[in-house]
């Protein structure tokens, strides 16, 4: 296991009566891209600001390289924060932007020049050094803002929603560039976003927050495949997971959900792991890609909508008044509104949540 | 008779042309989506249809009648903006009834109409509440209710979902489409998101830098973009584009060379392209990744794999070419792995090097 660069311990931060961050703890390893993910108001930005030293926590400590920095001002923490709107000075050249942080540190001109050129080359900015930062593209501005941070060799790079303001198309490319740069440079990053796909695509690990609390930490795949509760299950993944509500009935060779209609979930499989859940009020969840159209499908319904999701087509199948299921079909498939169809769910990818608490009752893949 | 016709509409500001000769027709009860990146001219076009702007040239016809110079309030169209101006100090009810009050309808009539539309949009519970208590989705529904309460002939929506979270936007797309089908209202929906346009629209107009590039059904748009710019705009994740040489043009196919490989693609193209270079495009989903060599596959090295939940976007280098492909979520892949790529020949599209037009 790599070295721990950042340790956040039991952080609490309140603003008046609002608890913005409620007892949050986690560790970030060297060279890792760690993402704080959650809907607006979940406390992710406040957590980042506490790490940067821009907010002082009510309780809890922040350690960087095993040194307690909680009482240190931002400039003494050796971290660098990149904001949503890249704080590049538009009227200054890219060179002067990058050199900015060094000039205040009383380093010789020759050394500054050497460092600026080194970082510019790493971030592929060497050809733009003499252009005004306000005149270059957004992606280049982002790199300039990051270069200005990296040149002072921070222990930690903190990014607060740096990609939210750009167009979807450009964002896709910038995500790729950011990830590649982070890997190539080996910098440790804490990244804040509300965009779940962005978090999945960029991160080594993700911490999901809600209402100030940390809900789950894991690799993108762990979080996607095994969400700990209904909130994570519905927050992660687009299109959203399918949810069916009802009472679970377990028989020897089949699993049935009693909703406004009876839904056959699985048949001809070993149902013993589910025995304890017989008669329980549950919410069944499965992702659209874990169900498919099949003539042998147990769940029957009528196609209500179709929509295009980039590489695939999504069809919405109405099973009953209360239940509707989305599944993927081939982008070029001939299936239309009003068609009767049947759906098969991959039994290994069925999630069962407690209706009352929202907690996962059984891990997928039992 | 065609319901709405937009005929040779252009708009200039000084010597800057923001719309070049726009032409399309919308049938009654249809949804037409207008898709284009920010700055393409979508809002200008909607405002011209609404009567808020006059075109420099061209006409707008409604049921055969020229309405180009009809003032907006006589058109009975409604328009909803990205951030609609809802009065913050008024309740949902007061916001929705506002346009009916302007028409001086009797109070009973107003009440009935407001309740009917609120029920239809599922916002009866917020009629007594003020806007600061609404969620993003509720806020947009109140704006829509206010737009629909006058039973407009045409509903113009300018990026109504842009400000919403991805999750809510996803629900709103389905909801909006359903609502439109029940009301049979004619809708023109502008969006920067090509996927939203293809999900919502019966037909889609692609608008790039003020030029109407294509008008098609969503499925046609996906299968046959008319030029490379359209293909690049509508393809998410980003399209792969290569320069290739057409080695041979046959009756029902063409042979092209990419890197050191030859690919035979089923198409009829002009014999003139034989020996010439063209652009070839293919979407990441139409490339398969294998761990072992396959017939006609390219050998490459993985640069990066980005996990996207249901699948992963893999960037691969083949000599000097960088290719993006979609792999299944269970496919184990690491940086520097050697992989083999197969391009689906029937999914390759060819474009002229100079005009960028589809040549297939």
Image (tube, rainbow, N blue to C red):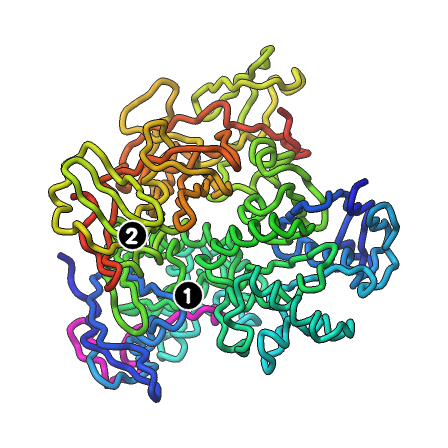
Q: Which residue is found at the position 46% from the left and 57% from the top?
A: B166
Vertical arrangement, residue A118 with respect to residue A65, above or below: above
Q: Describe the element under mark 1 as helix, strand or loop.
A: loop
| Disc number for residue A246 | 2
Say which quadrant the N terminus of chain A sits in.
Answer: bottom left
Whole-percent x, y for residue B338 in the image: 28, 32
Indicate the quadrant where residue A343 lies: top left
Residue toward you, B91 or B226: B91
Structural distance between the alpha carbons of marks 2 and 1:
38 Å
Q: Which residues are magenta?
A: A62-88
Indicate the quadrant where residue B48 lies: bottom right
Q: Is residue A78 magenta?
A: yes
| Chain that bears disc 2 | A
Instruction: Mark 2 and mark 1 in contact? Answer it, CB < 8 Å.
Output: no
Of discs 2 and 1, which sits in the foreground?
2
Q: Is residue B259 magenta?
A: no
User: Horizontally, is A107 left or right of A133 in the view?
Assistant: left
Whole-percent x, y for residue B316 in the image: 37, 37
Of mark 2 and mark 1, the one earlier in the sequence is 1
Whole-percent x, y for residue A161 in the image: 41, 65
| Disc number for residue A363 | none
Residue at the spot of label 1 = A161
User: Horizontally, is A132 left or right of B100 in the view?
Assistant: left
Q: Describe the element under mark 2 as helix, strand or loop.
A: strand
């Amino acid at each position: 296991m790599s070295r721990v660069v950042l340790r956040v311990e039991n952080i609490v931060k309140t603003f008046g009566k609002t608890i913005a961050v409620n007892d949050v703890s986690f560790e970030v390893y060297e060279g890792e891209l760690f993402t704080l993910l959650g809907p607006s108001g979940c406390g992710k930005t406040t957590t980042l600001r506490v790490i940067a030293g821009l907010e002082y926590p009510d309780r809890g400590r922040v350690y960087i390289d095993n040194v307690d920095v909680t009482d240190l001002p931002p400039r003494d923490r050796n971290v660098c924060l990149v904001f949503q709107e890249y704080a590049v000075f538009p009227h200054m050249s890219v060179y002067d932007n990058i050199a900015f942080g060094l000039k205040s540190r009383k380093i010789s001109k020759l050394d500054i020049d050497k460092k600026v050129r080194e970082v510019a080359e790493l971030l592929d900015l060497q050809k733009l050094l003499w252009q005004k930062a306000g005149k270059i593209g957004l992606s280049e501005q982002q790199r300039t803002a990051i270069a200005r941070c990296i040149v002072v060799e921070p222990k930690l790079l903190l990014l607060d929603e740096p990609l939210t303001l750009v167009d979807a198309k450009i964002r896709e490319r910038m995500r790729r560039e950011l990830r590649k740069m982070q890997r190539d440079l080996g910098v440790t990053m804490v990244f804040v976003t509300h965009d779940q796909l962005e978090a999945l695509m960029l991160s080594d690990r993700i911490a999901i927050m809600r209402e100030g609390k940390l809900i789950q930490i894991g690799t993108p795949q762990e979080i996607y495949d095994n969400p700990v509760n209904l909130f994570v299950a519905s927050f992660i993944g687009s299109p959203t997971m399918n949810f069916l509500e009802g009472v679970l009935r377990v028989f020897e060779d089949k699993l049935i959900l009693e909703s406004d209609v009876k839904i056959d979930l699985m048949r001809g499989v070993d149902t013993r792991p589910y025995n304890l859940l017989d008669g329980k009020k549950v919410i069944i969840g499965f992702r659209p890609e874990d169900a498919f159209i099949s003539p042998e499908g147990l769940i029957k319904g009528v196609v209500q909508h179709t929509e295009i999701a980039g590489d695939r087509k999504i069809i919405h199948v109405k099973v009953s008044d209360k239940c509707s299921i989305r599944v993927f079909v081939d982008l070029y498939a001939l299936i239309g509104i009003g068609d009767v169809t049947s759906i098969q769910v991959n039994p290994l990818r069925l999630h069962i949540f407690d209706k009352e608490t929202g907690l996962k009752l059984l891990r997928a893949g039992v | 008779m065609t319901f709405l016709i937009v005929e040779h509409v252009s708009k200039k500001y000084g010597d800057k042309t923001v719309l070049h000769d726009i032409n399309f027709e919308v049938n009654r009860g249809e949804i037409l989506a207008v898709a284009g990146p920010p700055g393409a001219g979508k809002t200008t076009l909607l405002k011209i249809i609404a009567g808020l702007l006059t075109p420099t040239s061209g006409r707008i016809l409604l049921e055969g009648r020229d309405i180009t110079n009809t003032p907006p309030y006589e058109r009975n169209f409604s328009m909803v903006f990205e951030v609609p101006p809802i009065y913050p100090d008024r309740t949902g009810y007061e916001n929705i009834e506002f346009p009916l009050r302007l028409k001086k309808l009797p109070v009973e009539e107003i009440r009935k109409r407001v309740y009917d539309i609120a029920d239809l949009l599922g916002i009866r519970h917020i009629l007594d509440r003020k806007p600061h208590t609404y969620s993003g989705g509720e806020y947009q529904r109140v704006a829509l209710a206010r737009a629909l309460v006058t039973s407009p002939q045409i509903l113009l929506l300018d990026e109504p979902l842009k400000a919403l979270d991805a999750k809510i936007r996803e629900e709103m797309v389905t909801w909006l489409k359903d609502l439109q089908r029940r009301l049979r209202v004619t809708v023109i929906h502008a969006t920067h998101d090509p996927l939203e346009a293809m999900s919502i629209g019966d037909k889609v107009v692609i608008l790039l830098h003020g030029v109407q590039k294509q008008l098609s059904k969503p499925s046609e748009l996906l299968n046959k973009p008319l030029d490379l710019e359209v293909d690049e705009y509508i393809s998410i994740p980003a399209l792969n584009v290569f320069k290739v040489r057409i080695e041979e043009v046959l009756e029902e196919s063409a042979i092209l060379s990419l890197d050191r490989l030859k690919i035979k693609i089923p198409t009829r193209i002009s014999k003139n392209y034989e020996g010439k270079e063209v652009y070839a495009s293919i979407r990441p989903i139409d490339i398969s990744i294998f761990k072992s060599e396959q017939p006609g596959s390219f050998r490459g090295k993985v640069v990066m794999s980005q996990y996207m939940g249901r699948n992963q976007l893999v960037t691969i280098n083949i000599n000097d070419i960088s290719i993006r492909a979609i792999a299944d979520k269970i496919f184990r892949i690491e940086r520097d792995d050697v992989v083999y790529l197969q391009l689906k020949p029937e999914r390759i599209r060819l474009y002229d090097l100079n005009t960028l037009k589809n040549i297939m």
